[in-house]
Amino acid sequence: MKDVNGNSIICEESNKICYTQKEAGFIINSCRRHGYKSWGLEQKNKPMRKYFCNSCGFWHTTHHKTYIGKKPKSKRLKILMSAMLFLLVITGVTGCSKKHVQQINASVQITDYAERTVTLSKAAEKVVVMADNSLVVVKQLKAIDKVLALDSKTKGYLPLSILNTTNPELGDLPDVGKTKSPNYEYIISLNPDLILFKGNKELSDMLQEKTGVPVACIISKGDYDFELYTKIGTLLGKQKEAEHLVKMFTEQKSALEKITAGISDSQKKSAYIVVQNSKSNLFKTMKASLSLELAGVRNVAANANKVDDWGFAEISKEEFLNYTPALIFLDKPSSPTEIQINDLQSDSIFSFLDAVKQKDIYLTHSFSLPKDYVYVIAEAYYYAHLAYPEHVTESVYKKAINTIFETAYSLENYYENWTETLR
């Protein structure tokens, strides 16, 4: 059931989604038609029955084999329910039972990235994350214990992520499928309060309609979209943590901008980034890098023409010969078969560069991972320290890294570990 704004109605007594008898029956019959084999170890959570809730006057689904509560028996009660449902849809009142059902005047409400209104009766405690850019945010908000399951893409990033170190148990979470083909029945069986979803409005609406679970579309904007923390923090009841993180990011970003603002254009260094790719193409790079820009380092590939949907540019060898980067950054290889520093040093074209001759080649963290503002800003300090060590001293660099990782990931004195990851 939905209110006039299209939001699911939540029973305050059970915190379950309210359905009409027909809607609840449809969910149960749909699950039965598709079979229950996909539940695996979660067989006990599969929706088995619908039942009438005396608290709110609507129907819920349950994994219990016998009915909870009682069916409405009297004709008078059915007429009363129909009348109250009519008032709910037409006038948008808060519900048939003001005491137990909360809708429009919910305690938690945001506008998501698809301009949809997401309404919860209270902060979410059980969350399915189907947005690869959201999992690190949930972790940084100190709400990782709320996560029940992940989508296939988000789970696939874990081996390369810092979360594999801080929270290795995330690898054991169930996989609810791809964003374009989710396992609706399995999601229903988990009984989540919220789904964080990386998809457009149509897919978000479909997922919410199929599961009956509130869905928040989370597609981060470009540049520094710190609103990402505010939106997710509000949904998870972590507003203070969100404010603290945004404050830290803003302060660290401003501090570095202030330092690099004092560097004249004639002193500015340039850099080229080699991105790991399936073809081991040394001429695949980043057209834009927030970290290089924040560090005050010019990206020699900023005017590249051949750019794909992910922002990666492919440079011709002839075009590359016109570049004279002072620094070269190599996307850190995750296996011996990927591009290594030796490959750059032995390449016939790269060997002409002064940066290669002077061994000014450095590793940088993987560009294949979703954007994490911790790494965007920390990497900027790293680049600036290498380019302008007299301005961004090791002391400044070390303090920034320790502050960023302690605030975001609760990792104290992380500087030594950080430098190890870049060797």
Image (cartoon, rainbow, N blue to C red):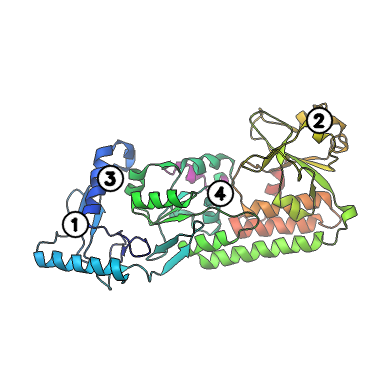
- Mark 3–mark 4 Cα distance, whole angstroms, equals 30 Å
Mark 3: amino acid: Lys
Quarter occupied by residue 265: bottom right
- Seen in the image, is 49 located left or right of residue 384? left
Residue 276 pos. (x, y %): 67, 35
Q: Please tell me which residue lies in front, 318 or 9.
A: 318
| Magenta-colored span | 165-174
The label on residue 68 is 1
Question: Which of pointers 2 and 4 lies earlier in the amino acid sequence?
Answer: 4
- Label 1, label 4: how far apart the Cα atoms are: 41 Å
Per the image, label 4 sits on a secondary structure element best described as: helix
Which mark, residue 345?
2
Q: Report which quarter residue 393 is drawn in.
A: bottom right
Q: Residue at x 27, y 73 (%)?
A: 99
Q: Secondary structure at mark 3?
A: helix
Residue underneath mark 4: 166
Q: Main secondary structure of the magenta part?
A: helix
Q: Residue furthest front?
A: 90
